[in-house]
Amino acid sequence: MNSTEKNKQIVREFYDLAINKKDYASIAAKYIGDLYIQHNPLVEDGPEGFKKFIEFLKTDYPDARSEIKRIFADGDFVILHVHSFRQPNTRGRAIIEIFRVDNGKVVEHWDTIQEIPGTSANPNTMF
């Protein structure tokens, strides 16, 4: 498996452990090193900042789930197109997640989040 494919695999598992399983201990043991740069203004830098985010999800959104619709990679950068549901029976949100991987660890993250509206000016879906 080449490094780009390996990075896709790392991010796919990291994302599932974080968002769907909310299992920080597994993430920390396998995918987070000393460096974790966060570009989402609501989440602190570093492993402890990410841990606080997972605890926030566990407390405020225990049923939150996300489905990766597409995954792209270019070297150390992995991009996810995600359908996210913070609460069941909602339209959810469309999210673009960008991760940078270094030596098998997720070291940097950006995201853009858009609520899915009830109506659209076109017949296309967001996925």
Image (tube, rainbow, N blue to C red):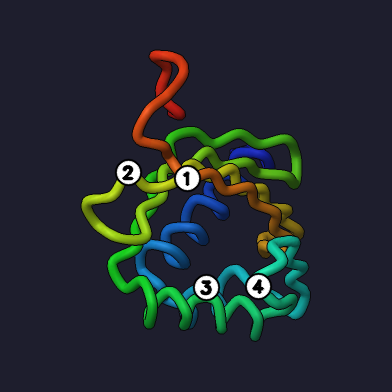
Q: Which of the marked residues, 1 or 2, is nearer the chain's N terminus?
A: 2
- The x, y position of residue 100, in whole percent, is 73, 53
- The x, y position of residue 68, in whole percent, is 43, 42
Query: Who's the residue at 43% across and 65% down the image?
Result: 17
Q: Secondary structure at mark 4?
A: loop
Q: Residue 79 sits in which quadrant? A: top right
Answer above or below: position of 50 versus 72.
Answer: below
Let me know if residue 6 appears in the view. no
Instruction: Tell me the CA gap for discs 3 and 1.
Output: 27 Å
In this figure, which residue is indicated by the disc labeled 3? 27
Q: Which of the marked residues, 4 or 2, is nearer the chain's N terminus?
A: 4
Query: Who's the residue at 35% across and 35% down the image?
Result: 118
Check residue 115 in the rendering and tell me which mark sits there, or answer none.
1
Q: Secondary structure at mark 2?
A: loop
Q: Is residue 45 left or right of residue 23?
A: right
CB under 8 Å between callouts 1 and 4?
no
Query: Who's the residue at 67% across and 39% down the image?
Result: 4
**Kind of residue indicated by mark 1:** Glu
- The x, y position of residue 112, in whole percent, is 63, 47
Q: Is residue 106 left or right of residue 13?
A: right
**Kind of residue indicated by mark 3:** Ile
In this figure, which residue is indicated by the disc labeled 4? 43
CB under 8 Å between callouts 4 and 2?
no
Q: Quadrant of the C terminus?
A: top left
Q: Is residue 101 left or right of residue 56?
A: right
Instruction: Tell me the CA gap for discs 1 and 2.
Output: 8 Å
In this figure, which residue is indicated by the disc labeled 2? 91
